[in-house]
Image (cartoon, rainbow, N blue to C red):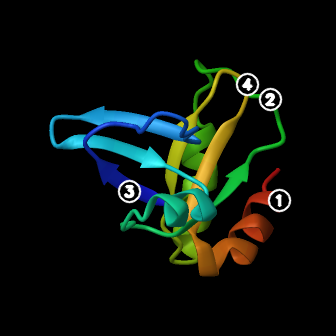
């Protein structure tokens, strides 16, 4: 779940956090968001790319984003040091996984 909060509560372990002027955007597991009583803005499935990527690699995001766009699947991407994490609408996850797996 993507939610906007003023600050991350103690004891909460978000999948990711982005600090913006409007507040903290947190990505949490659904059960954690529900436990905290948070209203969430976006329900997503997280796909972790199995291939280890480098933060300086060129074209990785473009390749899978283009494949997903052809299917009308929007995505939000966050890169870790080792893997890219692709967030897609929860109900489109299976098609997104299939499209990404088909990439060379």
- Kindly identify which residue carries mark 1: 101
- Kindly identify which residue carries mark 4: 82
Q: CA distance from mark 3 to mark 1?
A: 29 Å
Residue at the spot x=56%, y=72% of the render?
70
Residue 91 in the image: above or below residue 29:
below
> Are the two marked residues, 1 and 2, in contact with CB atoms closer than 8 angstroms?
no
> Are the two marked residues, 4 and 2, in contact with CB atoms closer than 8 angstroms?
yes
The label on residue 3 is 3
Q: Position of residue 16 (x, y in %)?
A: 52, 38
Q: CA distance from mark 4 to mark 2?
A: 5 Å
Q: Under tag 3, what secondary structure?
A: strand
Residue at the spot x=52%, y=46% of the render?
77
Q: Is residue 24 left or right of residue 50?
A: left
Q: Under tag 4, what secondary structure?
A: loop
Q: Position of residue 21 (x, y in %)?
A: 16, 35
- How crowded pointer 1 is (Cα within 10 Å; few <14, some 14-19, many 20+) is rated as few
Q: Is residue 50 left or right of residue 36?
A: right
Q: Earlier in the sequence, mark 4 or mark 1?
A: 4
- Kindly identify which residue carries mark 2: 52
Q: Under tag 2, what secondary structure?
A: loop
- Closest to the camera, between mark 1 and mark 2, is 2
Q: Earlier in the sequence, mark 1 or mark 2?
A: 2
Residue at the spot x=23%, y=41% of the render?
23
- Closest to the camera, between mark 4 and mark 3, is 3
């Amino acid at each position: 779940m993507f939610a906007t909060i003023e600050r991350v509560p103690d004891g909460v372990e978000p999948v990711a956090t982005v600090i913006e002027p409007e507040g903290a955007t947190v990505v949490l597991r659904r059960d954690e968001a529900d436990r905290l009583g948070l209203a969430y803005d976006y329900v997503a499935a997280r796909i972790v790319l199995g291939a280890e990527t480098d933060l300086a690699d060129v074209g990785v995001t473009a390749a899978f984003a283009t494949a997903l766009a052809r299917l009308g699947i929007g995505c939000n991407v966050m890169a870790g040091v080792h893997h890219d994490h692709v967030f897609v609408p929860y109900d489109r996850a299976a098609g997104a996984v299939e499209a990404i797996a088909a990439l060379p």
